[in-house]
Amino acid sequence: MSKPDNKAQKPFAVGEILDALQSGSAVRIAEIYRDAHPGDIEMAFERLDEAERLAILESLPVDVLGEWSDYLSPSELESFLDQVEDSKKKETLDSMSDDELVDFLQEVDDDTARAEYINLLEDEKRIVSEELLQYPEESAGGRMTTMLASVAEGITVKEALSQLEEVSDEAEMLSRIFVVNENNQLVGRIRLRDLAFAKWDTPIAAFMAHEQISISAYADQEEAAQMIARYDLLALPVVDSEDRLLGVITHDDAFEILEEESTEDIERQSGIGGDRGDLAYLQIPVMAHFRRRFGWVLVLAFLAVLSGLVLIKYEDVLKSFYVLALYLPMVVAAGGNTGAQSATMVIRAMALGELGPAQFLKVIWKEVRIGALLGLMLGLIVALQIRFLLPESATGGVDVLETALVVGISLVAQIFTSTFIGSSLPLVAKLTRLDPAVVASPAITTLVDVSGSVIYFTLARMILAS
């Protein structure tokens, strides 16, 4: 991501920025945009509704908007560009860093509009953008920047500094400098501070680090972010199939990727589909929220009918032993809670790269043991509570001890099966190349509701009706 120029910036409270943005004063808004840190502005901007955002964008001078274009969502930037002449569009687009520009172009749905934006770019920027657009949007190549610092191997410190001087204004960071051979293949890296304190005639090979941690341009962006975190990198080199250096993914891009991926997983675990893009919660229209949620709500509503069918099937048991109705919600909920817990733990471990296919059976074995312990403990506590605290008058003539056995054993069986289902479904989804988060909480909760009802009433019929 490109950085603003070296203007004095000071921290502003989000409330103060919001007051300025909502004041309607173009002068005050421009002052805020020039003086406040972009991170504070971005946070305040996300709390405004669509009408307020558009009004503010229209009131901003183009130079201000161009300066902070990297911090606006693609939809907001596109809305603005649709309303200005080509010269202003060109000025804004050329001011953007290449990775942010490509992110914006990838989000433009209209192919004609995308081609128009590309044609407005300077020749060099257009070539870079077209090259980056060849990579999938969520790949390492799709998120990298080509604004990096590299030097040739086999040169001296003086020669390296001379090469760096030529790219110092364009490189996104100089703290990590990559060393390449005559074929532009990555062979190592050096630090700027090593160059700064070494004698000019010293070969860079004397202090070059030869480790070549890199990632393929076609690898998933989440893998890139995980590598940056795992190896504590400021920048991760992106290479092609022949190890030629193409670009880098910086640590700030990794933070954005992890935030996007975690948001996506959380939403899918909650049964929210579709792509939210780069918009904050308040920026997403009501109908967009509706479309993203309705599908799962509809499917789960019909799946929940299965629980009703189970009640109909065991209607005779429920009528004969109505005390069972008192504990049915607890048995069902216990399964849903533990199943969701198990799924969450497994999905998190997979997301962090802690689990591979070889560990799947170990995971299931571990989770069912945890489920057995949880079930035994909860089942024992609830059974003792029923046995000693539930009055005989509340059971409708059913033996209290037998009631305690039904509920206690049901809890053990329900929690055991729920942890098995909760841990195995995400693993099966991973093996079949589905998103594990899609089969998480909503689906698991509905499934264990049905299984819990079957377990509960089957045990009741076996113990109480015998």
Image: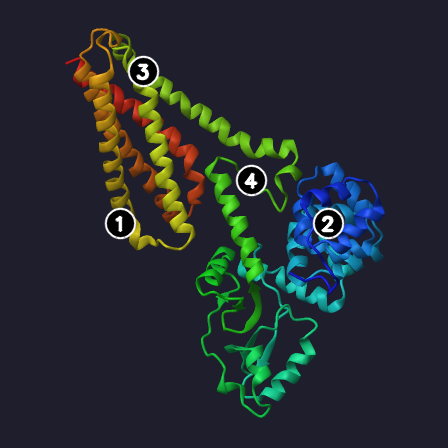
Mark sitting earlier along the chain (2/1)? 2
Q: Secondary structure at mark 4?
A: loop
Mark sitting earlier along the chain (1/4)? 4
Q: Secondary structure at mark 2?
A: helix
Q: Is residue 29 visible?
A: yes
Q: Secondary structure at mark 1?
A: helix
Few, some or many C-alpha atoms within 10 Å of disc 2 (few <14, some 14-19, many ≥20)?
A: many
Q: In the rendered view of the protein, which quadrant contains the C terminus? A: top left
Tag 1 near tag 4, CB within 8 Å: no
Q: Secondary structure at mark 3?
A: helix
414 to 143, vertically: above or below? above
- Disc marking residue 362: 1
Q: Position of residue 138 (x, y in %)?
A: 55, 54
Q: Amino acid at mark 3?
A: Leu
* C-alpha span from label 3 to label 4: 39 Å
Q: Amino acid at mark 2?
A: Leu
* C-alpha span from label 3 to label 1: 37 Å
Q: Which residue is mark 3?
A: 326
* C-alpha span from label 2 to label 1: 48 Å
Q: Amino acid at mark 4?
A: Gly
Q: Which residue is mark 2?
A: 77
- Disc marking residue 274: 4
Q: Quadrant of residue 440?
A: top left
Mark sitting earlier along the chain (3/1)? 3
Q: Residue at x 41, y 26 (%)?
A: 303
